[in-house]
Amino acid sequence: MIVYNVTVKTENAIAGEYVKWLKEEHIPEIIKTGCFTEARILRLLEIDESDGPTFAVQYHANSKALYNRYIQNFSDEMRKKSADKWGQKVIAFRSVMEVVH
């Protein structure tokens, strides 16, 4: 299994609205691509939140090929939608992991 992790720091003022958008719009749209089976939203703890909270969204793909399909066919559009909606109010970085146990 492949885990595509998107870590996002949000401004305090939009944190609640951002999580709502993730749950109701963004994650369902990404799952609808057929590349991922599920997604989880996690909030990082024990970090400085004076500028806002940090979330990790983990998308689970059954294979590297499905993850690659998402990157090749859908990721640019999804990143653009997010950037258009939130602009500089969120900062994101991505990582890819393989479940070993």
Image (cartoon, rainbow, N blue to C red):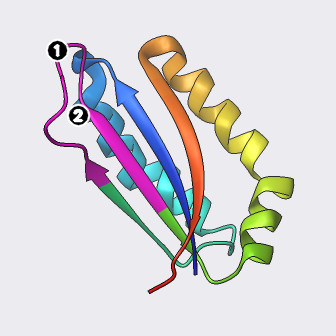
Q: Which residue is mark 2?
A: 16
* Amino acid under disc 2: Gly
Give the quarter of the figure containing the N terminus.
bottom right
Spot occupied by residue 83 in the image (x, y as percentages of width and height): 60, 25
Distance from disc 2 to disc 1, alpha carbons, whole Å, reads 15 Å
Count of labels in the image = 2
Looking at the image, do the residues carrying marks 2 and 1 touch, with CB atoms under 8 Å apart? Answer: no
Q: Is residue 53 magenta?
A: yes
Residue 28 shown left or right of residue 13 in the figure: right
Q: Dot 1 surroundings within 10 Å: few (below 14), some, or many (20 or more)?
A: few
Residue 54 shown left or right of residue 71 in the figure: left
Residue 88 to residue 96: above or below: above
Residue 92 shown left or right of residue 42 in the figure: right
Residue at left 77%, top 40%?
A: 76
**Which numbered disc flags the more N-terminal residue, 2 or 1?**
2
* Amino acid under disc 1: Ser
Q: Which residue is mark 1?
A: 50
Q: Dot 2 surroundings within 10 Å: few (below 14), some, or many (20 or more)?
A: few
Residue at left 33%, top 55%?
A: 41
Q: Is residue 54 magenta?
A: yes
Residue 28 to residue 54: above or below: below
Residue at left 24%, top 29%?
A: 53
Spot occupied by residue 15 in the image (x, y as percentages of width and height): 26, 29
Give the quarter of the figure containing the C terminus.
bottom left
Spot occupied by residue 11 in the image (x, y as percentages of width and height): 30, 18
Q: Magenta stretch: give its range.
A: 42-58
Mark 2 or 1: the one toward you: 1
